[in-house]
Image (cartoon, helix red, strand yellow):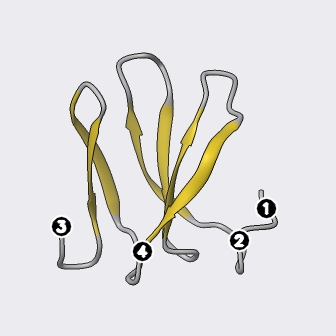
Amino acid sequence: MKTEEDKKEPLVIGLAFLLDGRIVPVDNKNKTCFVLSVSLQRQGSAFKFENKTMEVICYEENKLAVTLGYVV
């Protein structure tokens, strides 16, 4: 679902799950990553990138790595 922050219709192509149940999707078209609560409500502002986001992984309790094409 498009929000006021989105310039284009979102294309979520990767998800990470935090240990507390929150979900972190990456939106390829809007070049963003954001956090959803367990009730699927967006928390805070989206993280914006210069390149299109590809994938996200949680590698510690609250640390994420996001791939941006060929860049991590």
- Find residue 49 and name its label: 4
Label 2 residue SS: loop
Alpha carbon distance from label 3 to label 1: 26 Å
- Find residue 72 and name its label: 3
Disc 2 residue type (three-letter):
Asp
First along the sequence among labels 3 and 1: 1
Alpha carbon distance from label 1 to label 2: 5 Å
Disc 1 residue type (three-letter):
Thr
- Badge 4 crowding class, 10 Å Cα cut-off, few under 14, some 14 to 19, many 20 or more, is some
Label 1 residue SS: loop
Q: Position of residue 64 (x, y in %)?
A: 28, 45
Alpha carbon distance from label 4 to label 2: 13 Å
**Which residue is the site of mark 1?**
3
Q: Are marks 1 and 2 in contact (CB under 8 Å)?
A: yes
Q: Position of residue 53 (x, y in %)?
A: 39, 69
Residue 18 to residue 68: above or below: above
Q: Are marks 3 and 1 in contact (CB under 8 Å)?
A: no
First along the sequence among labels 2 and 3: 2
Disc 4 residue type (three-letter):
Phe
Residue 47 to residue 63: above or below: below
